[in-house]
Image: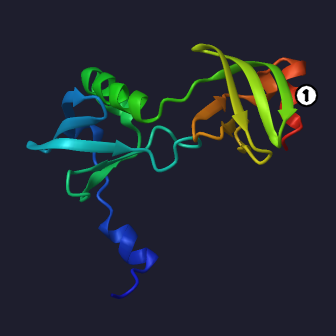
Amino acid sequence: MRAVGIEEWVAKLRILDPSRVRVVSVRTDTVDVEVDGALHAGVRPRRPFPYTHPECVILYGPGDEEIGIIRDYRRLDERSRELLERALGVIYFTPRVKRIIRVSSRGGRYEWLVETDRGVVKFETWSSCTRFLSNGKVVIKDVNGNVYCVENFFRLDKRSQLLLSIFV
């Protein structure tokens, strides 16, 4: 098996024109998509850059074949966008942290109490649980693999910023 060079990989990319893509139905975490008139059932949408470029989506067929890439799914027609966002919301369920109420250390782990857009949540992390991104976002991963997101570190209240800065 030979290695594929980056030029060859880029040449094989199939960038989809959003005006030629229509999402016709959604099932929990898959969608049925029509691309240039061809129907693809059971398509798995995936975000290759879920935190830095969440608008980019790759569509995979049931056999893991790549159907194509939508650079900005927000350019789909309104109904298609809504259906795709429903599936993406299940796949990338990520509560947004609005405020950090408390972080305490216990037994080599950290226990967090945070206010999210889904209510107050308590979870545990290890010390290397946060990832600061250049766009101000902060991603926090708990010991169970759940992900929480701070949309913009600089928009948090000062106490939340202080508690989060411990993990830099």
Q: Residue at x 33, y 42 (%)?
A: 45
* Direction from residue 102 to residue 73 in the image, left or right: left
Image quadrant where residue 77 sits:
top left
Query: Image check: 26 left or right of 47?
Result: left
Q: Is residue 107 left or right of residue 6?
A: right
- In this rendering, the answer to whether 56 lies above or below 151 is below
User: What colouring method underlies this structural image?
Assistant: rainbow
At label 1, the amino acid type is Leu
**Callout 1 secondary element:** helix
User: Which residue is labeled 1 in the image?
Assistant: 162
All told, the count of numbered labels is 1
Left or right: 72, with 132 as reference point = left
- The residue at the far bottom in this view is 2
Question: Could you tell me which residue is drawn at 46 percent across and 50 percent down?
Answer: 48
Image quarter of the N terminus: bottom left
Q: Residue at x 20, y 57 (%)?
A: 63
Q: Quarter-wise, where is residue 107 in the image?
A: top right
Residue 132 x/y as whole percent: 74, 43
Outermost residue toward the top? 119
| Residue density around tag 1, few if under 14, some if 14–19, many if 20 or more, within 10 Å | few
Q: Residue at x 28, y 48 (%)?
A: 16
* Above or below: residue 117 compared with residue 108: above
Q: Position of residue 24 (x, y in %)?
A: 16, 29
Please name whichever residue, 24 or 72, is drawn nearer the observer in this view of the structure: 24
Q: Nearer the viewer, residue 84 or 42?
A: 42
Figure quadrant of the C terminus: top right
* Residue 27 in the image, given as x and y percentages of width and height: 23, 29
